[in-house]
Image (cartoon, grey):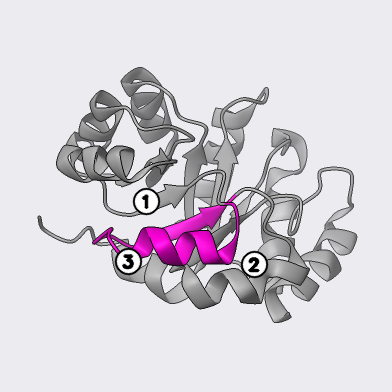
Amino acid sequence: MEKHPLFDIFMREKIVAILRGLSPGNAVACGDALVRAGVRLMEVPLNRPGALESIRLLAEHFAGNGIVVGAGTVLTPEQAERVKEAGGEFIISPNMRPATIRRTKELGMLSMPGFATPTEAFDAIDAGADILKAFPCGTPENIAVLKSVIPLPVFAVGGVVRSSKRAFLKTADGVGAGIGIYRPELSPEELYRFAKEFMEE
């Protein structure tokens, strides 16, 4: 399988900021704060109002700047299509649905589906996934066991916070961080300080 153009960026950056609860009204300001803190990969989950508009605003704002914006909690091929229309560049899911993976790849986006078992992981690989998301990730030791048999990179997601980040990065290829790096109640300046602490841990 040919490597997706974003693959090396994910492998280099290793941290996906999950912006659950981001609103279009402050999407750009929060995005700027996160970039100042060192974030380069931003995931906007679709299970919150205004998610597609937030993706559109971020994608337009950061176009050509090396900041990659995509969507999380993508459950169907139709949702993947809407993310593409909004300017998103990657699709992350909590589950493994071959149809969603295949449509994501047809649209030229990077695919990171979720899995909980080796069987799901290998089914995702067969469908064309680029990277796998262990969700819920459990412990760093659990990731190490999974990676002993899974040939694709694995990102740990689900409860990764500042105190556990280093341990997960020793066994996983990267992490997705939600409440550990982003909280919607924070002002942009507060968010910058909060995210910077996570990134520098």
- In terms of depth relative to the viewer, which is nearer, 37 or 141? 141
Amino acid type, callout 2? Val
- In terms of depth relative to the viewer, which is nearer, 95 or 100? 95
Give the magenta-colored segment's residue range. Answer: 138-157
Amino acid type, callout 1? Leu
Q: Which residue is mark 3?
A: 148
Q: Which mark is residue 141?
A: none
Disc 3 and disc 2 in contact, CB within 8 angstroms: no
Disc 1 and disc 3 in contact, CB within 8 angstroms: no
Q: Assess whether residue 11 is covered by the magenta stretch.
A: no
Residue furthest left as drawn = 1
Residue 104 picture quarter: top left
Q: Assess whether residue 148 is covered by the magenta stretch.
A: yes
Q: Which residue is mark 2?
A: 35
Name the element at disc 2: helix
Quarter of the image with the N terminus in it: bottom left
Q: Earlier in the sequence, mark 1 or mark 2?
A: 2
Q: Which mark is residue 132?
A: 1
In the drawing, does residue 49 fall left or right of residue 149? right
Q: Earlier in the sequence, mark 3 or mark 2?
A: 2
- In terms of depth relative to the viewer, which is nearer, 92 or 34? 92
Q: Earlier in the sequence, mark 1 or mark 3?
A: 1
Quarter of the image with the C terminus in it: bottom right
Name the element at disc 3: loop
Other residues around mark 3 within 10 Å, as few (<14) / some (14–19) / many (≥20): few
The mark closer to the camera, 1 or 3, is 3
Residue 23 picture quarter: top right
Q: CA distance from mark 1 to mark 2?
A: 24 Å
Is residue 8 placed above or below 122 in the rendered structure?
Answer: below
User: Residue shown at 45%/29% (left/top)?
Assistant: 74
